[in-house]
Image (tube, rainbow, N blue to C red):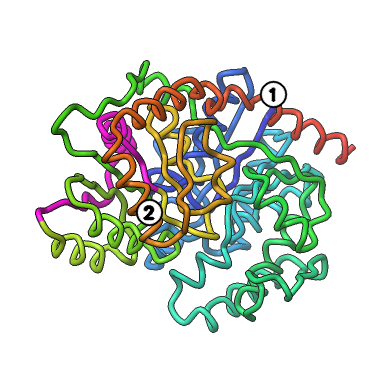
C-alpha cells in the first residue's frame, strides 16, 4: 500500500503529533508499505520520503512552521499524490496542510483517514493572542476551504459553552465528518466527538511508540528509590497554560525532599523558569526543549513522571514513552486513566496542586510502591509498541478504501 501522511507539524519540531507520525511511518515501512510525509518545514528535507509543503517565511505561530498558501499546498499535493500513485491519505491535523490534503485527495478520488489528536479548542484559547478574534479568523479561513455544514455542536456541554470553543468544535467535527474514516487515540475523546456530532465511523486506536524508541530504551530495570535518596520526578510537555505547568510547580513547592525536572518549551517558559528559580533548595530544574533521546534518558533515570493537564490531552505520547521506559506515571486528569497500565500509575484524588502533592508525598514516603508501579509498567510496555497496533491501522485504511470503491 502507498500511504501519504499529511500533517501541519513534523520533525525537527517536538510534540505528540510529530512523534505519532514518525511512529506510523516507521512501522508501516517496516511492514513493506511505501510511506511519504507531507508537512510545512523551515527548510527542505534531506529525506526524500519527507516532502516540504509551501511554508510561510516569517510566520511560525508558537514556533511551528506554517503551511502557506493553502492553494499552493493543495496543488503540490495533488501532483505528488498522482505521481506516487498514493492509495490512502492519512491526515493528522486540522490546519492548512490538512485542508490541502483533503482537497488534493478528493480531486483524485483518494480516500482520507483523519486522526483526531486533540482539543484545539483548548489549545487556541491558551496559546493564541486575542482568541476571540484569532479563532474567528481561523474558523473563517477553514470554512472557506471546507464546509462546516456537516457540524452540529451541542452548546450545553461544559466544554462548548463559549463562542470560541464552539467555533473550534465546529471545525473539528466538520473535518472529521468529511473524512472516510476517523481514528481517535482515546475512548474519552471519541465519546466527546460522537456527542458533538461526528458521524463518520470512528476507531479508537492507541498512538503507539515506534520500535526504534523501544530499541533505544532497551530492557528497563524496575525503579528503586534507595535509602536516603530523593524521589526524582519529571514533567515533560509544552510549557503552555493548557498543560498546567503551574499546578506542577505548586505541588512540588508543597513537597520537600524531592528533585524535580521539567522538559519542554512554550509560551509559559519565562514564567515557569522564574517560579522554579524561586522555589527552595533548587528542587526544580527547567531544562527547556531537548531532543527525544535526552527525554528518554531522563525517563530512564527518574522515579515517576507527572502529567498535570486537565480536560485537554487525548493520549499524551510522553505517557506512552514513560511506560516504554518502565516509569510510573501520575495523572491529574481522570480521563487519562485509560492510558495507564494496570497497577502502573496513579490518578490523583483531586486535580489541583493539593491532590498532586498528596500523590507525590505518598511515593516519597513509600519507596516500595515506586518499585511496584514500575514493575507493572514494565510488564505492559509491549502494549505501547506501534507494531501492536499496526494491523488495526491497516484495517482502517482497508475500510476507507472499500468506501472509496
Q: Position of residue 200 (x, y in %)?
A: 81, 50
**Magenta highlight on residue 15:** no
The answer to whether residue 178 is left or right of residue 183 is: right
> Which of these two is toward me, 337 or 301?
337
> In what quadrant of the picture does the C terminus appear?
top right
Residue depicted at 66% across the width and 58% down the height: 99
The answer to whether residue 369 is left or right of residue 188 is: left
Mark 1 crowd level (few <14, some 14–19, many ≥20, 10 Å Cα): few
Q: Position of residue 211 (x, y in %)?
A: 48, 22
Q: Residue 356 bears which disc, if any?
A: 2
> Which of these two is toward me, 213 or 307?
307
Q: Earlier in the sequence, mark 2 or mark 1?
A: 2
User: Is disc 1 placed on a helix, strand or loop?
Assistant: helix
Q: In whole angstroms, how far apart are the C-alphas of marks 2 and 1?
A: 37 Å
Count the labels in the image.
2
Q: Position of residue 109 (x, y in %)?
A: 81, 45
Q: Are marks 2 and 1 in contact (CB under 8 Å)?
A: no
> In what quadrant of the picture does the N terminus appear?
top right
Q: Position of residue 323 (x, y in %)?
A: 44, 31
132 shown above or below 88: below
Q: Which residues are magenta?
A: 281-306
Residue on which the image places disc 1: 391
Amino acid at each position: 500500500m502507498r500511504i501519504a501522511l499529511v500533517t501541519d507539524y513534523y520533525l525537527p519540531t517536538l510534540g505528540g503529533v510529530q512523534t505519532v507520525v514518525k511512529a506510523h511511518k516507521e512501522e508501516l515501512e517496516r511492514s513493506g508499505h511505501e510511506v511519504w510525509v507531507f508537512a510545512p518545514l523551515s527548510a527542505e528535507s534531506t529525506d526524500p520520503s519527507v516532502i516540504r509543503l509551501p511554508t510561510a517565511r516569517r510566520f511560525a505561530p508558537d514556533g511551528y512552521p506554517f503551511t502557506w498558501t493553502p492553494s499552493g499546498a493543495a496543488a503540490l499535493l495533488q501532483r505528488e499524490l498522482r505521481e506516487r500513485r498514493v492509495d490512502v491519505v492519512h491526515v493528522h491535523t486540522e490546519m492548512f496542510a490538512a485542508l490541502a490534503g483533503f482537497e488534493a485527495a478528493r480531486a483524485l478520488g483518494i480516500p482520507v483517514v483523519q486522526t483526531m489528536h486533540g482539543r484545539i479548542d483548548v489549545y487556541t484559547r491558551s496559546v493564541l493572542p486575542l482568541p476571540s478574534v484569532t479563532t474567528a479568523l481561523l474558523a473563517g479561513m477553514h470554512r472557506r476551504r471546507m464546509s462546516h455544514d456537516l457540524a452540529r455542536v451541542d452548546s450545553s456541554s461544559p466544554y462548548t459553552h463559549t463562542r470560541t470553543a464552539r467555533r473550534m468544535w465546529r471545525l473539528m467535527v466538520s473535518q472529521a465528518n468529511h473524512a472516510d474514516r476517523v481514528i481517535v487515540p482515546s475512548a474519552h475523546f471519541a465519546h466527546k466527538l460522537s456527542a458533538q456530532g461526528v458521524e463518520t465511523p470512528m476507531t479508537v486506536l492507541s498512538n503507539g511508540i515506534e520500535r526504534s524508541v523501544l530499541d533505544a530504551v532497551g530492557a528497563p530495570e524496575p525503579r528503586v528509590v534507595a535509602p536516603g535518596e530523593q524521589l526524582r520526578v519529571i514533567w515533560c510537555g509544552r510549557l503552555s497554560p493548557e498543560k498546567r505547568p503551574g499546578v506542577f510547580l505548586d505541588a512540588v513547592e508543597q513537597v520537600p525532599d524531592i528533585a524535580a525536572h521539567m522538559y519542554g518549551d512554550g509560551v509559559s517558559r519565562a514564567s515557569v523558569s522564574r517560579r522554579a528559580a524561586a522555589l527552595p533548595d533548587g528542587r526544580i530544574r527547567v531544562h527547556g526543549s531537548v531532543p527525544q533521546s535526552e527525554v528518554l534518558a531522563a525517563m530512564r533515570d527518574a522515579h515517576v513522571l507527572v502529567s498535570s493537564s486537565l480536560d485537554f490531552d487525548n493520549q499524551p505520547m510522553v505517557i506512552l514513552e514513560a511506560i516504554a521506559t518502565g516509569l510510573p506515571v501520575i495523572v491529574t486528569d481522570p480521563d487519562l486513566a485509560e492510558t495507564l497500565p494496570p497497577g502502573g500509575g496513579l490518578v490523583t484524588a483531586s486535580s489541583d496542586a493539593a491532590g498532586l502533592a498528596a500523590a507525590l508525598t505518598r511515593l516519597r514516603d513509600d519507596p516500595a510502591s515506586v518499585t511496584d508501579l514500575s514493575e507493572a509498567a514494565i510488564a505492559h510496555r509491549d502494549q505501547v509498541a506501534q507494531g501492536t497496533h499496526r494491523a488495526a491501522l491497516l484495517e482502517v485504511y482497508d475500510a476507507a478504501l472499500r468506501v472509496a470503491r
